[in-house]
Amino acid sequence: MNAERLQELAALNAIGTLDGTDLSEFNQFLAKADHASKAELASFNNVAALIAAARQSPCRPAPAVKTKLMEKIHAAAAKKPAGHETEPHAAKPSIFRFVRHGEGEWLPPLIPGVRAKLLSLDVARNYAMIYAELEAGVRYPQHHHSAGEECYVLTGDLCVEGHELGQGDFHHAEGGSDHDELTSKHGCTAIFVVPADAFLEK
């Protein structure tokens, strides 16, 4: 089984739509796979679980949806020009995800006055992108960074290490650093990029 086929089956298995001969093929691979391969495939389930938690609708797609999707994938693969399979421009992403304003689920609150949504999670590259809203007067406690952290202020104000950040301002903290208390006088919204492993531990 080639890598592309394996990733296709693993992704379908993670979202619970793998069945029939596809499921049998996937289970046969798992029965012979080594520990490293099984651990890599398990990451599909971890990501799928977090994305499922952020879905706005709990509805499960009808079985016919998978059939139509697979037909389109195979049809697109059949149209690839011979000899161009390895060219970078020939590979196009098959899945796009959008989170509109007002969509998604708020994560369990860490401290009063702060709420956040998970926008994106990449376990392989070890990052999680989070949208956060801080109320006026919030004081976020001191904390340690196991890896680098990024912060981009969208609106409002945020005081970091004695620096007043406003709309459009950016801050980077190196891995191994310790942040003093973060504060916001009037409240703010911001995008944070944090290590995925640290996020998953919370």
Image (tube, helix red, strand yellow):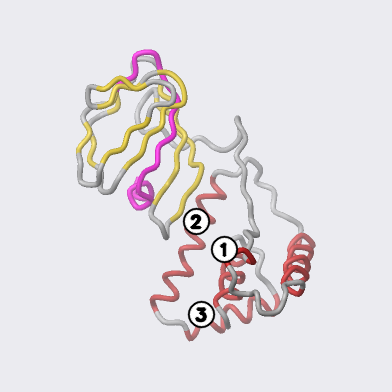
What distance separates the C-alpha of mark 2 from that of mark 3?
Answer: 19 Å
Q: Residue 99 location in percent, x, y?
A: 60, 39
* Magenta highlight on residue 196: yes
| Magenta residues (range) | 183-202
Q: Which mark is residue 47?
A: 2
Of residue 188 and residue 135, the one placed in the foreground of this image is 188
Q: Position of residue 81 (x, y in %)?
A: 72, 74
In the picture, the disc for residue 14 is: 1
Q: Secondary structure at mark 2?
A: helix
Q: Which mark is residue 4?
A: none
Indicate whether residue 122 is drawn in magenta.
no
Q: Quadrant of residue 71?
A: bottom right
**Structural distance between the alpha carbons of marks 2 and 1:** 8 Å
Three-letter amino acid code at the position of disc 3: Leu
Residue neighbourhood size for the residue with mark 2, other residues' Cα within 10 Å, grouped as few (<14), some (14–19), many (≥20): some
Q: Toward the viewer: 185 or 41?
A: 185
> What residue type is disc 1 on?
Ala
Report helix, strand or loop for mark 3.
Answer: helix
Instruction: Residue 144: name its quadrant.
Output: top left
Place residue 167 in its image quadrant.
top left
In this view, 6 is above or below 45: below
- Left or right, 76 with respect to 83, comes to right
Q: Against 184, is 78 above or below?
A: below
Q: Earlier in the sequence, mark 2 or mark 1?
A: 1
User: Circle 3 is placed at which residue position?
Assistant: 30
**How many residues crowd around disc 1 within 10 Å: few (fewer than 14), some, or many (20 or more)?**
some
Residues at badges 2 and 1 in contact (C-beta under 8 Å)? yes
Q: Is residue 8 left or right of residue 195?
A: right
Q: CA distance from mark 1 to mark 3?
A: 14 Å
Name of the residue lying farthest toward the bottom: 32
The picture places residue 174, in percent across and down from the top left corner, at 25, 43
